[in-house]
Image (tube, rainbow, N blue to C red):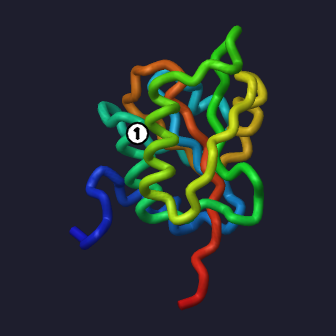
Amino acid sequence: MLRNIPPILSPDILHSLRAMGHGDVIAIVDANFPAYSVDCTRVHRLDGIPATDVLEAVLTLMPLDTFIPDPAYVMQVVGDPDAVPPVVEEFQGIIDRVSDNPTKINSSERFAFYDRSKSSFAVIQTGETRLYGNILLTKGVIPPS
């Protein structure tokens, strides 16, 4: 065990987060997401863990990118792109509370979101059963101390 590392993050997830560079994307996705179909070789499973818990754990360790306008993306509701599902409201609250770079979440159409997902460094597939419980995060830099 190590201190100050959320225990829900597996050693493989920690390795991926550490190996990511500035500008790399990590996808935190729900149980319905086609994780293995987005051409990512690093799919980590956290079955039974809500996406909101995973987002909070990841943001305690990883900074969001400050050099781009939209370091956090979610999928729009099909047929109602202006709708904000409850899980996305929770995502925004977590980003506002935990991130070192609080930012407004942006959204994209379903297939555009899948296309964005294909460039992910890693995918964390959660046990989230709420629809639209998917978020893409772009890693930022840790400033020198």
Q: Looking at this rendering, what residue extends furthest in the top direction? A: 79
Q: Residue 43, relative to residue 25: is it above or below?
A: above
Which residue in the structure is indicated by mark 1? 52
Q: Nearer the viewer, residue 136 or 77?
A: 77
Q: Looking at this rendering, what residue extends furthest in the left direction? A: 1
Which residue shows up at 50% across the image and 50% down it?
95
Q: Please tell me how crowded label 1 is: few (under 14), some (14-19), or many (20+) other residues with Cα within 10 Å.
A: many
The amino acid type, in three-letter code, at marker 1 is Thr
Percent coordinates x, y for residue 144 in the rendering: 59, 88
Which residue shows up at 64% across the image and 66% down it?
140
Residue 20: which quarter of the image? Answer: bottom right
Which residue shows up at 76% across the image and 54% down it?
69
- Determine the secondary structure under disc 1: helix
Relative to residue 61, is residue 69 drawn left or right? Answer: right
Percent coordinates x, y for residue 93 in the rendering: 45, 43
Q: Residue 116, relative to residue 133: is it above or below?
A: below
Please state, as top left, top right, bottom left or bottom right, where the N terminus lies in the image. Answer: bottom left
Does residue 13 appear in this view? Answer: no
Q: Looking at this rendering, what residue extends furthest in the bottom direction? A: 145
Percent coordinates x, y for residue 85 in the rendering: 52, 22
Q: Residue 63, relative to residue 145: is it above or below?
A: above
Q: Nearer the viewer, residue 78 or 118?
A: 78
Q: Nearer the viewer, residue 83 or 36?
A: 83
Relative to residue 105, is residue 130 drawn left or right? Answer: left
Percent coordinates x, y for residue 30 in the rendering: 48, 29
Q: How many marks?
A: 1
Does residue 25 appear in this view? Answer: yes
